[in-house]
Image (tube, helix red, strand yellow):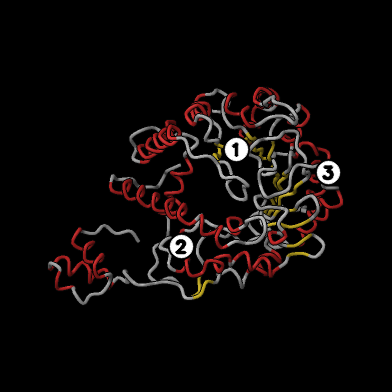
Amino acid sequence: MIIKITLEIYEYLNNHGSDVTYVNELSSEGKNFLLDLKEQGLLKDSKPKIIYHPMTDLVEDMLKSNLSRMTLQVTQNCNLRCQYCVYSGSYNNRVHNNKRMDIETAKKAINFLKNHSQSAEDIIISFYGGEPLLEMKLIQECVTYSKKVFEGKKVSFNLTTNAVLLSEENIEYLSKEDFILTISLDGPKEVHDKNRKFVNSDSGTYDIVMRNLEKILDIAPDYIAKVTFNAVLDDESSFKDTNDFFMKHDIVKNMIVSANSINAVNRKEQLKAFSVKNYVDRNYESFIGMLYSLGRVDKDCVSHLIKKEISDIKEKISDRSIVDSTIPIKSHPGGPCVPGFQRPFVNAYGKLFPCERVSETAEYMCIGNLDDGFDMNRIKEMLNIGRLTEDNCRNCWAYNFCTQCVATADDGICLSKENRLEKCNAVRNYVESMIKDYIVLKENGCQFTNLV
């Protein structure tokens, strides 16, 4: 719970903590205020004694019959060689190769999902690579087979693509089957083409991607509503130019964009120091987002690239439940999802992973396979990753706000306590920034009801 206090109370808490022994040092108003806080159950020392995720005892039942989605890696090959790609060789991970998922493995994965989704009403199957459109025939077979296997349930399909292979035939098929299509697009030509290049070539793909977007508008104009973008923000490129592109370009300005920084997890070499100009430009757009939150500017003025910052303040701070009890004796810092439940990922070999973002070359990241099923011991270990840094977590003020999952502890060799702790300051800074922004917005009248 976030409460506004006086300077007098602040100084008292700073000197004495929640000890009421010296309460007579306060003014009568301050004394009453402090005692009222104590009476409401605040100012308690509520550190957990045992790091233990509350879902640990339920995870086996959850995975047995409640799965609702699965991502299939239909190929490990790609027609591009993007410089920041986690499969580029710059990361402790696999590299692009000719391995593809055969139809038998794909059907086995769909059957696996069927056998573990008896309690789920809706099913989502996603296709991932490499570049999944290299295996369009396999995808079509999977769609046909899934509809047969899940007859009686609603089945939806997602696909993430670099959009180079969006032929008329592919567009018509994806539109007919109502695919949610995520296209990798980093911004204007000079930004996009800096990293997103063809194999063994210095040629970028921007012109082809934009032509294919125009093709979608010509062939299936209503289908454009099913298309979203994923933009990777390279700090060596201009944030302002990228932002202007997504705000002003006729084709993309009204579409949803998910903005991500270059992945630092498992990277062999550290990223270069950040650009001051980009820092300033991005924070300017964040300020516009704050003005929107206060009703000072229209929603159309808010950058697509920072909308998540605004929604995070609402979802993670404003909408957070206020509880009247301390942290349970047995609990776990926030961060980990339930491995294999939220975003189960099957690679081309039929191995199971928590999601598509972890390293496929690390055996300790594998949570089973299609033949033997889930490795429950491994899943429970991942779920309780906080035990790796138990003493540090127990004493961290951002305990409930932590965003770290098992992936941040991966060092390419094992799960590393040092790797996990390296990210802690960044998480705390992120949480502190959200809380400060929330307070400023709250004090200026923000209602947090209809934010992006």
Which of the two labelled residues, at mark 1 and mark 3, occupies the earlier sequence position? 3
- Nearer-N-terminus badge (1/2): 1
Q: Position of residue 71 (x, y in %)?
A: 71, 50
Total numbered labels: 3
Residue 311 as seen in the image, left or right of residue 358: left
Q: Which residue is mark 1?
A: 230
Residue, x 66% and y 46% (percent of image)?
Answer: 91
Mark number displayed over residue 141: 3
Real-space Cα distance between discs 1 and 2? 28 Å
Q: Quadrant of residue 17?
A: bottom left
* Left or right: where 144 falls relative to 10: right
> The residue under label 3 is which amino acid type?
Glu
The image quadrant that residue 420 belongs to is bottom right
Disc marking residue 400: 2
* Few, some or many residues within 10 Å of mark 2 (<14, 14–19, 20+): some
* Residue at the spot 12% in from the left edge and 67% down from the top edge: 27
Residue 108 placement (x, y as % from top left): 82, 55
Q: Is residue 342 above or below residue 288?
A: below
Residue 28: give x, y in percent of width and height. 12, 68
